[in-house]
Image: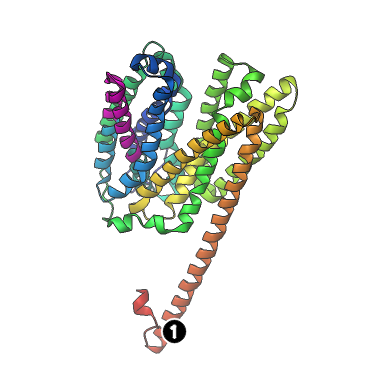
Amino acid sequence: MRTTAEDDGFRAGALIWFAVATFSMGIDGYVLAGLLPQIATDLRVDAAAAGQLMSVFAATSAIAGPLLGALTGHWERKATIVLALGVFVLGNLLVGLGPTYFWVMLGRVVSALGAALLNAVIGSYVIARTPERYRGRALSLMMGGFLFATALGVPIGLAIGQADWRIPLFLVVGVGAAALIGILLRVPRLHLPVLSLREALSPLTRPAILVVLVVPMGLMCASYLCFTYATLILGPRIGEGYPMIGALFGYGIVSLAGNIVSGRATDHRGPVAVLTVIVTTVLAAALLGWAGLMLPGIAGAVAGVAWFLVCAFFNGGSGVAAQTRLSAMVPPAVAALVLALNGSMMMLGSGLGSALGGVALAAGALPDQLLPFSGAVLAVTLAAHLLSVGVLRRRSAVDGAADSAAGSAVDSAAGTGEPPMGGAERA
């Protein structure tokens, strides 16, 4: 797979080891959620306390990602990746060996710190070393490891975790260690321009970037508003147990396919067009899926599964387009912060979606009614996306006009022998 230019020394082999690293993070991010009863029993805590192991990981990652991305922006990139992955592996080893709830919680915090920095710095490395025309496919391959973990790694982890919930953690440690060795051997070093902390944090002062970040947050919010309660929506129609496991496995496979297609489409059509198609299609799927669920018998079941898989395909492809769009708005030296913010907004969106769905159900809403609720979130997301496109186009037009005027002034000065007004300031 040709995902990088041949003239910059960056090879697909490096991307593969990055994908292995994200595969280990994908297993770690989801597998414990299915083993909470075993964890609670072993650590002698209640189910709510066991669930906090997931919440603390997500909260730590969301907060630490942008901070660590900014603070380490001037570090050599390969060394930063190795450090982040090493901390992630060490944290999971501590979780696997932790004798008490305190040590397991500490391990989750440590692993979250490593994962937060790793997510940011791997993406920025790929962007810096990959020509723009290949970035979509490069990011697709890197993120494919995470999606492959949700499709295959998590089910395997859940299966082997039935005997002992700690075994999947050792699987994460083993895969992460393999990725660490591969990165040490195959990934070239990379130095980016040294920036001050103020320069590293400069994306936070750009409203356009903040508006663009609403899109991944909205997509994740709408997705988890329904995905968290998918068993309540699809279970009565297709059956619980193995049919539902099959549906979730299908969701992971189709998400992986969407990721691959999105990478190529982003390179050919651009991230803005791809994101427009994704948000619009998922919005239409939510509304049509809600109507389809009203059909009786097998027709309602088919409509429900179709909605579920359509969302899987387009949600799976959204990450590549979002990261590519954000990376095009900033220099590579500050990409780590922007990508960390993207990850934080996605985590915030997923948590907000799950909470909104729970509130709606507690207020008396039926599970099927979560689809139009997600549609409302997607409508707001689409409006924010179109607003950001319009703002950036107007800004581009203004910049283009300014550059044209400056060019005319230079040409005029060349004919008269006088310097253009403002030339020194502009330079």
Q: Is residue 249 above or below residue 323?
A: above
Q: Main secondary structure of the magenta part?
A: helix
Confirm whether residue 11 shows in the render.
no
SS type, badge 1: helix
* Up/down of 204 relative to 16, above or below: below
Q: Which residue is mark 1?
A: 412
> What count of labels does the image hold?
1
Q: Which residues are magenta?
A: 89-117
Q: Is residue 67 visible?
A: yes
Is the residue marked by circle 1 packed among few (<14), some (14-19), or many (20+) residues within 10 Å?
A: some
Q: Position of residue 128 (x, y in %)?
A: 35, 49
Which of these two is toward me, 310 or 34? Answer: 34
- On the image, which quarter does residue 9 sit in? top left
x, y percentage for residue 52?
40, 28
Q: Position of residue 195 (x, y in %)?
A: 28, 56
95 drawn magenta: yes
Of 229 and 325, which appears nearest the observer? Answer: 229
Question: Which of the pair 381/84 is nearer the observer?
Answer: 381
Relative vertical location of residue 187 with respect to residue 299 in this rendering, above or below: below
Q: Quadrant of residue 57?
A: top left
Tell me which colouring the rendered structure shows.
rainbow
Q: Please provide percent x and percent y for residue 427.
A: 34, 74
Image quarter hosting the N terminus: top left
Is 411 placed left or right of 253 in the picture? left
Q: Nearer the viewer, residue 301 or 19?
A: 301
The residue at the point 57 percent across, 49 percent down is: 273
Q: Amino acid at mark 1?
A: Ser
Q: Looking at the image, which residue sits at the far right?
A: 296
Check if residue 375 falls in the magenta segment: no
In this picture, residue 306 sits left or right of residue 341: right
